[in-house]
Image (cartoon, helix red, strand yellow):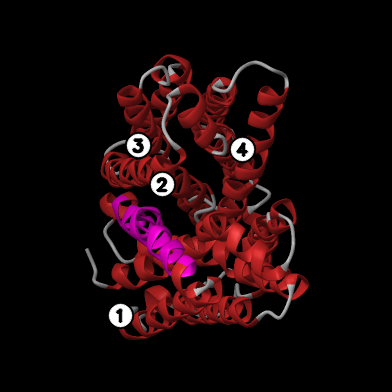
Amino acid sequence: MPLALLALAVGAFGIGTTEFVMMGLLPDVADDLHISIPTAGHLVSAYALGVVIGAPLLAALTARLSRRAVLIGLMALFVAGNALSALAPGHGWLLAARFVSGLPHGAFFGVGAVVAAAMVAPERKARSVSLMFLGLTVANIVGVPAATLMGQHLGWRATFLGVSAIGVAAIAALALLIPRDHGHAAPATGLRGELAALRSLPVWLALATTVAGFGALFSAYSYITPMLTDAAGYAEGSVTLLLALFGVGATAGNLLGGRLADHSLRATLAGGLTALVTVLALFPLLMRAPWSAALAVALLGTAAFVTGSPLQLMVMEKAASAPSLASSANQAAFNLANAGGAWIGGVALAAGFGVTSPAVAGAGLAVLGLAVAAVAYGVDRRLAAPGTGRERVVAGHVPQAAETVRH
């Protein structure tokens, strides 16, 4: 695997750290800025809104630029957003700075996945993408706990300065390790080609699978703390360690999914979603004892992140002629899954179905993800049938045979 993947992983590590560390810093930020915890929670939403808006917007605006230059520019924006967060004089300024911090998130992962896949042989694409995402999962094990600890002892502003330093290191790594060769030059398709790829039905089905599949994860994970304390009987002080188990499971699942998807992308995706349905459906039973609850947390991370690389690669393949915008849109879909899954889990909880009901609701979403993936498979088979004449319209590119006839 190319050493350049390390540069992408460092950037992913910084992004993953800043995305999730705010949850642990909310009490400190609220006390320092003299606001309530719910008001401080809007800082999490501001970041997510930045991701959803920034992912397709920045990918579209930079469609004609060198991908290497785009990655460095996105990381520079990331550094600026986190530095502004550290220097924000009040809640309003911090809210705006968190929004700016979220803007490059989706486009960095989207363009980074395209670059990672381009650096290796076709049979190693999924593994290459999973190594970039390794930075995100490791951030949950190392980055977030360390940054939270820094914020608690040195102040929350020090945390964002530290994250900015990670961003600077990522910029240096990208400049040194990402080659300037033809494979990472500006895409030939430009904005028009990128937008045309988004008219593809298979691309939208892949994005819908992402929303449903990861919505299932966040339906349960958003309410994992009350499950562990109220159902499994853990003390609140033990939750941080248990969430690190989730990070370990996510890292293992990410690496496993990348390796398996290079052999069979669809089988890996179907297997991961099936495993996610099973784990979530068993949550009410697994949460009855501390040891099985800890196992459930680790298995949840593994089952969910087995599907991460296959979903990203599937979107890229469906938009093969112009993958950057579609790949970035998939990152927006991840964040929509975060918001939508948390909302659905909250509805189940508010309805009085029990503290583990968000996990059961998540199992339903995972079943929906399997159904959408099955529909996508059927569409692909139909389009691949000889004589359909629809490959160009739906797949977003002209097949080689069609090009030969036309010229």
Q: CA distance from mark 4 to mark 3?
A: 21 Å
Residue 41 sits above or below residue 96 on the image: above
Q: Which mark is residue 208?
A: 4
Q: Position of residue 281 (x, y in %)?
A: 47, 17
Secondary structure beneath label 4: helix
* Amino acid under disc 1: Leu
> Reading the chain from its start, which is encountered first: label 2 or label 1?
1
Q: Position of residue 287 (x, y in %)?
A: 42, 21
Dot 3: few (<14), some (14–19), or many (≥20) neighbours within 10 Å? many
- The residue identified by callout 1 is 177
Q: Which mark is residue 393?
A: none
> Reading the chain from its start, which is encountered first: label 3 or label 2?
2
Query: Is 149 on the left or on the right of 93, as rendered?
Result: left
> Reading the chain from its start, which is encountered first: label 2 or label 4?
4
> Reading the chain from its start, which is encountered first: label 4 or label 3?
4
Mark 2 or 4, closer to the camera: 2
The region drawn magenta spans 127-152
Residue at the image position 36 percent from the left and 70 percent from the top: 10
- The residue identified by callout 2 is 240
Q: CA distance from mark 3 to mark 2?
A: 18 Å
Pick the front one: 146 or 372: 146
Pick the front one: 242 or 8: 242
Secondary structure beneath label 1: helix
Number of marks drawn: 4
